[in-house]
Amino acid sequence: MKKLIILVSSLFFVTEAFAHHFYNKFPVTLKGYSGSKTNSVSYSGQIARHVLHDSLKKLAGKGDGGSNAASLEAQMMMYFKGSKEDLDIIAPKTKGDFKIKQTTLNQISKGKNLSGKTYKGIINGWPGQMTGPEVIEFMIKKAAKTKGGFDPSTGYNYPQLISKFAMGAVFYNQSVDNYLDEKMTADNKPNNKPYKDGAHYTGKEHSWDEAFGYWGAASHGLGLDAKQNYNVTKMKDMAAADQNKDGVVDLKHEMNFAHAYYAASYDKGGKTNYYNTVTQAFLDGRKIIAGAKGDALSAKERAALAGHIAIINENWEKVIAESVFKYAGSVYKDIVKLEEILASNGNTDKQFSKYGKHWGELKGFALALQTGKSNLGETAVKLNRLTGFGPVLMNASQVTGVDSQGNYLKEEAQSWGEFKLHMLKIQKLMVDKFGVKAKASDMLSDMADLASKMGNSDSAEND
Amino acid sequence: MTEGTFLTEIFEHFFDPKKRVFFGYLLVSIFLALGWLVFFRNKSFKKAITKIFDIKILFSRSARADYKVFLINRVFMIFLSPYLLSQMVVATSIYYFLHSIPLFKTSHFPEIPANAVALLFTLSYFIFDDFTKYWVHRFMHKWPVLWALHKVHHSAETLNPITVYRTHPLEGVVFSIRGAFTQGIVISFFIYVFGNKVDLVTILGVNVFVFAFHIAGSNLRHSHIGIQYWSWLEKLIISPAQHQLHHSIDLRHYDKNFGATLALWDWIFGSLHHSEDVDSLVLGIEEDHIDHQSLRDLYIHPLKEILQISLSGFRGVKSIFTIFKT
C-alpha cells in the first residue's frame, strides 16, 4: 500500500513537472462561468492561419507559366482572404510515417483568413506604396502567372516573398503590435470579463493565447531540444512531434510553425536560445494571468506581464533579424558563384534561380522586420536601400518601381561588387542594431577565424 | 581577473608556441648554442655550458632591468590590449573597400586547390610581416620621436632572450598598430580573392615559417652566442651575430641590419652588414647623463625627450610664423 502511494504520488509530481513545460492546459478562471469546459487555453484560430500561410506558400509555386494563372490566382485568394467553404490543407500534409491529424481547415477552426489580420500600414520596402494586404494580393497575382513561382525577368521568387513577408505582416505584427500591446492595457479585454460574450476564457487569457498561437511553438516544445523542434517542422521526427502518442500529429498543438521554427533552426547551432526564451516567457505570462483567478489584473501583475512581453518582443525581433543576416550571406555567396560561372562562360540559370530564392527570403524577412511594434526609423531606410526593390539581374538591371498598371519598372543597377557590399552592410546592420548572435552564413567569419588563428600582436616585443 | 589567471597571463608567453620565448624554442636555442660552441668554436663541452649560462651576462644589471621591464610591460599590455586597434577592424574596412573597386573582381579561383592557396597565404603573410617589421624598425632608428622610444631597447648592455621584451610600452603600441595593419591587409586581400579557401599552414598552431625561424634559434639574436652564417646566407637571413652587431655601439654599425628574419630587405635597401666576432663588440648606447638600467629612466626619460622634441618642433613652427610677421 505504501509503495502504491509513493508510486502514485511520484507519478503525480512527474506529470505536474511536465505540465509546467506545456502550454496546453490552464484552468477556467472566468467568474460566473457555468459551462462544462475545464481548459481555458484556445488558439486554434492562429493555427488555422499558420496552415493558410503554409498552404498559400505551396500554392504560390504551382504556376505553370500562364495557362493556370486565373484559377491559381482564385485559389490563392481563397487561402489569403478566406472562404465560406471548407478548404483542403495543402501544407503541412502527411508525409510517410509523419501523419497529420487534420486534412481540412475547418477541422482546426472555421471562417479564418489572413487578409483581415495583415498589417495595414504602407510597406515602404516594396515598390508601389501599397499597404500590407495590397502587397500580398499584388504578389499573389504575379505569382499565378509564373512558372513554379519564379519570375526570371525580375528575379522574384514569390513563394518566398509571400511567405516570409506574411509571417511578419500577419503573425509577428498581430502578436507584438496588437495582442501583446493594446490588448494588454488595463481596460482593453480585461481579465474579469469574458473575451467575448459566451466565451469560457477571460479577455486577458485569450489575448495572451492568441499572441502565443502566432508565435507558432508546439505546446510541448519546451520539453524538446532545438534539433527536435526543428525536425518537427521538417516532418522528420514523429516521436518528438506526437506528444500524446495517438499516432498522429495534431496541428493544433503538436507542430512548430513560422518564426518558432526559425528560432529552433538558429538555436540548434548552440549560440542562441530564442525558442525556449520566447516560449518560456509566454508560459510564465500565462501563469500570471491564470494566477489572477478571474479578477482584473493588478498593476503589479501587469508590470510582471510587461517584463515577459519585453522578452518576447526582443527575442522575436532577433529571430527575424537573424534570418535577414543569414539570407544576406546566402545572397553574397550566390553572387560569388554566379561570377564564377560567368567567368567560365557556363549556364547561370540554375544558380540565378537559387539566388532569386535567397534574395526573396532576405527581402521577405527584411519587410517582416519592419512590421513589429516599433518604428525602426533609419534602420528600416538603410535596410530597404541596401536590399533594393529587387535583386541585381544578369543584365545589370534591377526593379526600381511599379507603374500605375502594376508593371515593374527596371533601371540600370549597381555593380555586383557593390551589391555584395550591400549584403555585408546588411549583416553589419543586423549585428549593430539587433545584436544577432547565431550569425548563420556570416561573411566576415572566415576573416575572424583566420585572424584568431594568426593571433594578435599586442605585446611589446622588439625583434 | 583572479590572481591566478593574472599570473598565468603574465607568464603565458613561455607556454605559447606563437611566442619566441616559448620554453621549447629556448631549449632548442640552448642546443644550437652548444653545437655552435663545441663544433664551430672548438670549445669543450664544459666551457661551452659555462659560456651559455654565463652568470655575468644572465644576471648583469642590464639583464635584471630586462626582467623587470618584462614583468611591468606584461601588466601594461594585459590592460592595454583591449583598447588597441584590432586586425579585424583594418581587415573589414579594406574588405568593404575592395568591393567598390569595379576593376578588382573576386573570382575565388576555383581551379586553384585549397592547400596551394593556404601555402601562398602563409608565405605571403610571413614575407609581408617581415617587410613591415623592417620598415617600422628602420623608422624607429631614423625618426627622433621614435628613436627616443626605441633607445630603451638599445640601452641593453648585455643581451639575453628576454631582451626582446625590453621595449617602451608606447613602442609596443606602435608595434601592435603595425601588426594590425599587416594582418588586416593580407587577410582582407586573400579572403576577397580566394574566399574561404584561405588558411594558415601551421605547426603547433604557429605559422610554419615563423615556427622554422624560432626552431632555427631566433632566441639567439638576443644573446652572447654569436652564431654566424655563410656570407651568402647572411644576405638572405639575418644571423644571430648580425643582429648582435645591430646593438653595437660602434659608429660603423649604426643603422645596420634592421631585418627581423630576412636579411633580404637590408640587402635591397642598403643597410646590410655582415656579422663580426660578437665578443669584440660593445653593446648599448652612448648617452652618459642618464642611468640606462634604472626603471625610472627607462620609462620616463623617453617621454621627456619626446616632449622636448615636440616643443622644439612647435617653437620651430612658431618662429616660421614670426618671420612672416616681420
Image (spheres, coloured by chain):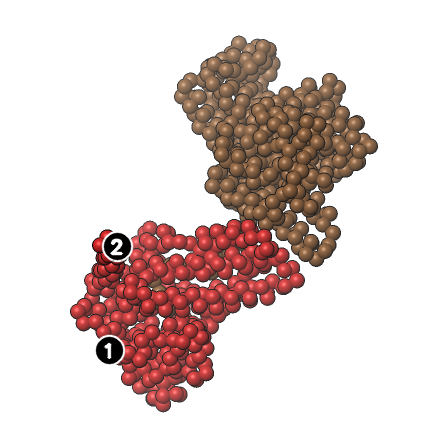
Chain colours: A brown, B red
Give the quadrant of residue B38. bottom left
The residue located at (55%, 67%) in the rendering is: B119
Q: Chain of mark 1?
A: B
Q: Which percent across, then down, holds residue A363?
A: 61, 37
Q: Chain of mark 2?
A: B
The residue located at (44%, 68%) in the rendering is: B130
In the rendered structure, the answer to whether residue B226 lies left or right of residue A19 reads left
The residue located at (50%, 20%) in the rendering is: A182
Q: Which percent across, then down, holds residue A278?
A: 52, 33
> Which amino acid is tagged 2?
Phe
Q: Which percent across, then down, holds residue B127?
A: 48, 68
Q: Is residue B256 above or below residue A418?
A: below
In the rendered structure, the answer to whether residue B106 lies left or right of residue B38 reads right
> Which amino acid is tagged 1?
Lys
Frontmost residue, B169 versus B286: B286
Gap between marks 1 and 2 measured at Cα? 59 Å
Q: Which residue is mark 1?
A: B56
In the rendered structure, the answer to whether residue A428 lies left or right of residue B321 reads right
Residue occupying the far right of the picture: A67
Residue occupying the far left of the picture: B289
Q: Is residue A130 above or below residue B267?
A: above
In the rendered structure, the answer to whether residue B32 lies left or right of residue A217 reads left
Frontmost residue, A450 versus A200: A450
Mark 2 or mark 1, which is nearer the start of the sequence?
A: 1
Q: Do the residues marked 1 and 2 share a common chain? A: yes
Query: Which numbered tag is attached to residue B324?
Result: 2
Label 1 SS: helix
Q: Is residue B282 above or below residue A402?
A: below
